Amino acid sequence: MTTLTHIAVGAVIAKAVLAGHKIQADPTIVYAVSILFSHLPDFTQPLIFLRYRVRKSHHLYSMYHKPIFWLALYAALQLTLPHALWNTIAVYANIALIAVGVHFLLDSFGPFRGVVWFSPILKKELYFVKLQEEPTSGREFIKAYAKTVVHKVQFLIIAGCLLYLLKKPV
Ligand SMILES: [Zn+2]
């Protein structure tokens, strides 16, 4: 999925969390955390434009693109931070974990690559759509991606997100 889709979905997660739950959290920080972490697993992705091989390896080899990294980070923070500090940030850490999880869920619908959900136990990519052969250059990748159904569906997702974000709370 593209950056724009991840950001739009991140904003929706924030609004849904704030609307659906009576949580003790600063709404601005909730939006910031949700949007940031919705995209954070892809932060090595811009290397696509520097070296195609880096992009290709991104989904498979970037430690930030594996659910286990985020689960381990969450657990490490919970176990090591002083109790009072963890209690203060726990609500944001939970939102960050949801945002990262939704990121991987969306990426499982990518046209060329899946997500190694259970790495390092199972290094197989898992995906919910039939994968197409991955183009061999960054330029070809962008061209091929623009022709996929996933690319078109993203516009519907973004439009849906905007409608939800613009809707006034009931
Ligand atoms: Zn991703």
Image (tube, rainbow, N blue to C red):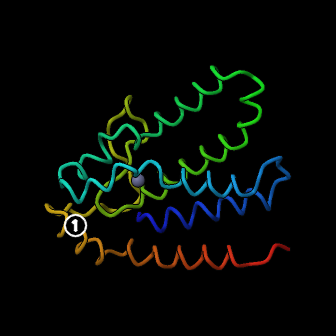
Q: Residues within 10 Å of mark 1 (few under 14, many from 20)?
A: some
The one nearer the camera, 148 or 9, is 9
Q: Is residue 75 left or right of residue 113?
A: right
**Residue 162: x, y in percent?**
61, 77
Query: What percent of the width, then of the height, locates residue 5?
Result: 48, 67
> Which residue type does callout 1 highlight?
Phe
Instruction: Answer above or below: position of 15 versus 99.
Output: below
Give the quarter of the image for residue 14.
Answer: bottom right
Residue pointed to by mark 1: 141
User: Where 135 sits versus 53, above or below?
Assistant: below
Q: Position of residue 120 (x, y in %)?
A: 37, 30
Instruction: Tell me the element at label 1.
Output: helix
83 in relation to 159, above or below: above
Q: Quadrant of residue 117?
A: top left
Q: How many marks?
A: 1
Q: Quadrant of residue 48?
A: bottom left
Q: Is residue 148 above or below residue 83?
A: below
The residue at 36%/75% (across/down) is 149
